[in-house]
Image (cartoon, rainbow, N blue to C red):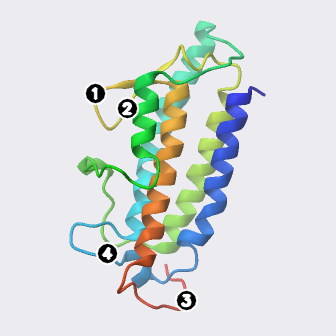
Amino acid sequence: MNAQIEGFLLELTSIVQDMPGVGAGLCEAQFNWSPAPGRWSLGQCIEHLNITADRYLPLLRSAIAGARAAGRLSSGPFSLNLIERLFLYSIEPPARIRVKAPAAFIAPPTLSPTATVQRWDQLQAALADTIRSADGIDLRAVKVRSQFGPVSFTLDGTFAILLAHERRHLWQAREVRKQAGFPAGQAAGG
């Protein structure tokens, strides 16, 4: 397997292993608690990642299939371009710049903890399969249009940015738990 793909899969494994400490075992009140008006709850952070994965997975699969069909193959090594590196730096946690998400990516205020985390688990497994399926593709030759703005990134950059985006919002969710007023709770609900 290509070293870049292995690296992405290791990053994703780390993200998946982080979730139990962030969002597992919370009651509905904790999962949906917002630190202030206009601020996201822990659940909204996770559901935002679900919405993002749900929007990106078909694009990634299509780009990978198109690259295979066109013979755009390479074993690398690959590196991010300057714009991708700058964008990646700006979204890695801790958040340096707050950016308003497009309305289509904002989760509702009330979510089921169990259903949201289960959906996250399923989408993470699908993302891992999609990353694996890119093994052998020329990650620099394939472009994927960003769903957050009028820009396209290479497949290499898109994977790196998506994983940083996940780290950012899991960090944000973890920060919600640290806020004064975060409700005490016992049992997970759903």
User: The residue under label 4 is which amino acid type?
Assistant: Ser
Residue hosting label 3: 187
Q: Amino acid at mark 3?
A: Ala
The kind of residue tagged 1 is Pro
Residue 180 in the image: above or below residue 95? below
Question: Which circle's residue, 2 or 3, is located before the other in the chain?
Answer: 2
Residue 139 versus residue 31 in the image, above or below: above
In primary-sequence order, the first of circles 4 and 1 is 4
Instruction: Please report the residue visible at 40 percent of the width from the left and 72 percent of the height from the top.
Output: 176
> If you read the primary sequence from the N terminus, does the residue marked by circle 4 or circle 2 appear first?
4
- For label 2, the crowd category at 10 Å Cα-Cα, with few meaning under 14, some 14 to 19 and many 20 or more, is some
Residue picked out by circle 2 = 146
- For residue 34, the mark is 4
Q: What x and y, as percent, mark residue 92?
A: 46, 47
The residue at 36%/84% (across/down) is: 180
Q: CA distance from mark 1 to mark 3?
A: 43 Å
* Residue 140 falls left or right of residue 8: left
* Residue 144 visible in this rendered orientation of the protein: no
> Is any atom of residue 171 visible in this view?
yes
